[in-house]
Amino acid sequence: MEMKGEYTIPASRAAVWAALNDVAVLKAAIPGCDSIARLSETEIEATVTAKVGPVKASFKGLVTLSDLDPPNGYTIRGEGKGGVAGFAKGGAKVRLAEGPAGTVLSYDVDAAVGGKLAQLGGRLIDSTAKKLADEFFASFSKLAAGSETAA
Protein backbone atom coordinates (compact mmCIF):
# COMPACT_ATOMS: atom_id res chain seq x y z
CA MET A 1 0.00 0.00 0.00
CA GLU A 2 1.25 3.45 -0.87
CA MET A 3 -0.24 6.68 0.37
CA LYS A 4 0.78 10.31 -0.04
CA GLY A 5 -0.64 13.38 1.56
CA GLU A 6 -0.10 16.95 2.56
CA TYR A 7 -1.53 18.94 5.45
CA THR A 8 -1.12 22.58 6.41
CA ILE A 9 -0.68 23.03 10.14
CA PRO A 10 -1.26 26.55 11.51
CA ALA A 11 2.02 26.64 13.46
CA SER A 12 5.68 27.38 12.86
CA ARG A 13 7.94 24.68 11.48
CA ALA A 14 9.84 24.59 14.80
CA ALA A 15 6.58 24.00 16.71
CA VAL A 16 5.48 21.25 14.30
CA TRP A 17 8.90 19.59 14.53
CA ALA A 18 8.76 19.69 18.34
CA ALA A 19 5.24 18.21 18.31
CA LEU A 20 6.30 15.41 15.92
CA ASN A 21 8.94 14.45 18.48
CA ASP A 22 6.77 14.80 21.60
CA VAL A 23 5.35 11.43 22.70
CA ALA A 24 2.56 13.12 24.70
CA VAL A 25 1.36 14.93 21.57
CA LEU A 26 1.67 11.77 19.49
CA LYS A 27 -0.28 9.70 22.05
CA ALA A 28 -3.10 12.26 21.99
CA ALA A 29 -3.12 12.45 18.18
CA ILE A 30 -2.75 8.79 17.14
CA PRO A 31 -6.21 7.18 16.89
CA GLY A 32 -6.46 4.22 19.29
CA CYS A 33 -3.05 4.81 20.90
CA ASP A 34 -3.03 2.94 24.22
CA SER A 35 0.58 3.65 25.18
CA ILE A 36 3.70 5.22 23.76
CA ALA A 37 7.22 5.52 25.14
CA ARG A 38 10.46 6.94 23.83
CA LEU A 39 13.21 4.35 24.17
CA SER A 40 15.97 6.54 22.71
CA GLU A 41 16.39 9.58 20.48
CA THR A 42 15.54 7.41 17.47
CA GLU A 43 13.25 4.68 18.86
CA ILE A 44 9.65 4.81 20.05
CA GLU A 45 7.54 1.89 21.24
CA ALA A 46 3.76 2.08 20.99
CA THR A 47 0.62 0.02 21.45
CA VAL A 48 -2.34 0.96 19.24
CA THR A 49 -5.78 -0.62 19.02
CA ALA A 50 -7.22 -0.44 15.52
CA LYS A 51 -10.30 -1.74 13.76
CA VAL A 52 -10.09 -2.59 10.08
CA GLY A 53 -13.45 -3.84 8.84
CA PRO A 54 -14.47 -6.73 11.10
CA VAL A 55 -10.96 -7.18 12.55
CA LYS A 56 -10.08 -5.32 15.75
CA ALA A 57 -6.66 -5.86 17.24
CA SER A 58 -4.08 -4.34 19.50
CA PHE A 59 -0.76 -3.80 17.74
CA LYS A 60 2.48 -3.45 19.63
CA GLY A 61 5.32 -2.06 17.63
CA LEU A 62 8.67 -0.37 17.48
CA VAL A 63 9.24 2.74 15.38
CA THR A 64 12.68 3.89 14.30
CA LEU A 65 13.47 7.43 13.13
CA SER A 66 16.28 8.00 10.64
CA ASP A 67 17.53 10.63 8.21
CA LEU A 68 16.87 13.20 10.94
CA ASP A 69 17.00 16.71 9.48
CA PRO A 70 15.58 19.09 12.14
CA PRO A 71 13.27 20.94 11.55
CA ASN A 72 12.80 19.77 7.95
CA GLY A 73 11.81 16.12 8.39
CA TYR A 74 12.79 12.51 8.89
CA THR A 75 12.16 8.96 7.79
CA ILE A 76 10.08 6.75 10.04
CA ARG A 77 10.05 2.92 9.84
CA GLY A 78 8.09 0.54 11.99
CA GLU A 79 6.43 -2.80 12.44
CA GLY A 80 3.45 -3.69 14.58
CA LYS A 81 2.30 -7.16 15.53
CA GLY A 82 -1.37 -7.77 16.23
CA GLY A 83 -1.37 -11.45 17.17
CA VAL A 84 -3.85 -13.50 15.12
CA ALA A 85 -4.98 -10.35 13.30
CA GLY A 86 -1.60 -10.18 11.60
CA PHE A 87 1.01 -7.50 11.25
CA ALA A 88 1.61 -4.14 9.67
CA LYS A 89 4.99 -2.77 8.67
CA GLY A 90 6.23 0.09 6.63
CA GLY A 91 7.75 3.50 6.56
CA ALA A 92 7.17 7.09 5.67
CA LYS A 93 9.19 10.10 4.61
CA VAL A 94 7.92 13.15 6.48
CA ARG A 95 8.86 16.62 5.24
CA LEU A 96 8.11 20.05 6.66
CA ALA A 97 8.13 23.28 4.65
CA GLU A 98 7.04 26.85 5.22
CA GLY A 99 3.65 27.67 3.77
CA PRO A 100 1.51 30.82 3.58
CA ALA A 101 -0.82 29.59 6.37
CA GLY A 102 1.73 27.77 8.54
CA THR A 103 3.79 24.63 8.04
CA VAL A 104 3.11 22.23 5.18
CA LEU A 105 3.65 18.65 6.32
CA SER A 106 3.93 16.17 3.47
CA TYR A 107 4.29 12.43 3.78
CA ASP A 108 4.93 9.49 1.50
CA VAL A 109 4.01 6.10 3.03
CA ASP A 110 4.89 2.61 1.90
CA ALA A 111 3.29 -0.11 4.05
CA ALA A 112 2.36 -3.78 3.99
CA VAL A 113 0.01 -5.93 6.05
CA GLY A 114 -0.17 -9.67 6.59
CA GLY A 115 -2.33 -12.25 8.33
CA LYS A 116 -6.09 -11.76 8.66
CA LEU A 117 -5.67 -8.07 7.77
CA ALA A 118 -4.27 -8.98 4.36
CA GLN A 119 -7.36 -11.09 3.64
CA LEU A 120 -9.67 -8.07 3.99
CA GLY A 121 -8.72 -6.59 0.66
CA GLY A 122 -6.72 -3.60 -0.44
CA ARG A 123 -9.59 -1.14 -0.81
CA LEU A 124 -10.80 -1.62 2.77
CA ILE A 125 -7.26 -1.34 4.14
CA ASP A 126 -6.50 1.74 2.02
CA SER A 127 -9.72 3.52 3.04
CA THR A 128 -9.12 2.71 6.72
CA ALA A 129 -5.51 3.95 6.50
CA LYS A 130 -6.66 7.20 4.84
CA LYS A 131 -9.35 7.70 7.52
CA LEU A 132 -6.83 7.11 10.33
CA ALA A 133 -4.33 9.50 8.70
CA ASP A 134 -7.02 12.19 8.42
CA GLU A 135 -7.99 11.69 12.09
CA PHE A 136 -4.34 11.84 13.16
CA PHE A 137 -3.57 15.03 11.24
CA ALA A 138 -6.76 16.78 12.40
CA SER A 139 -5.84 16.09 16.04
CA PHE A 140 -2.12 16.70 15.51
CA SER A 141 -2.76 20.03 13.80
CA LYS A 142 -4.80 21.30 16.76
CA LEU A 143 -2.24 20.05 19.29
CA ALA A 144 0.75 21.50 17.41
CA ALA A 145 -0.97 24.87 16.96
CA GLY A 146 -2.07 24.84 20.62
CA SER A 147 1.41 23.99 21.91
CA GLU A 148 2.83 26.97 20.01
CA THR A 149 0.33 29.42 21.48
CA ALA A 150 0.95 27.96 24.96
CA ALA A 151 4.71 28.46 24.58
Image (spheres, rainbow, N blue to C red):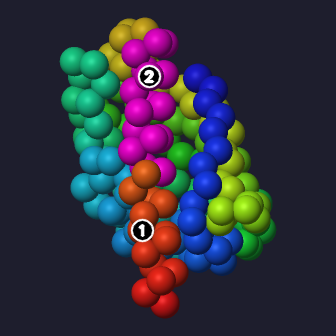
Numbered range of the magenta stretch: 122-137
What amino acid is at disc 1? Answer: Leu
Q: Residue at x 48, y 31 (%)?
A: 130
What amino acid is at disc 2? Answer: Ser
Res 70 quadrant in image:
bottom right
Provide the residue designation for mark 1. Answer: 143
Q: Is residue 80 visible?
A: no
- Rendered position, 110 above or below 74: above
The stretch drawn in magenta includes residue 129: yes
Res 74 quadrant in image:
bottom right
Residue 54 horizontal side relative to residue 109, left or right: left
Where is residue 18 shown, x and y percent of the image? 57, 76
Q: Camera-side residue: 136 or 88? A: 136
- Rendered position, 52 above or below 118: below
- Rendered position, 94 above or below 150: above
Q: Secondary structure at mark 1?
A: helix
Q: Residue at x 57, y 60 (%)?
A: 9
Cα distance, mark 2 to mark 1? 24 Å
Q: Residue at x 33, y 48 (%)?
A: 31
Where is residue 55 shown, x and y percent of the image? 24, 22
Q: Secondary structure at mark 2?
A: helix
**Number of marks drawn:** 2
Where is residue 105 shown, x and y percent of the image? 65, 54
Within 10 Å of disc 2 (Cα), the crowding (few <14, some 14-19, many 20+) is: few
Within 10 Å of disc 1 (Cα), the crowding (few <14, some 14-19, many 20+) is: many
Q: Is residue 124 visible?
A: yes
The stretch drawn in magenta includes residue 101: no
Where is residue 26 shown, x and y percent of the image? 42, 63
Provide the residue designation for mark 2. Answer: 127
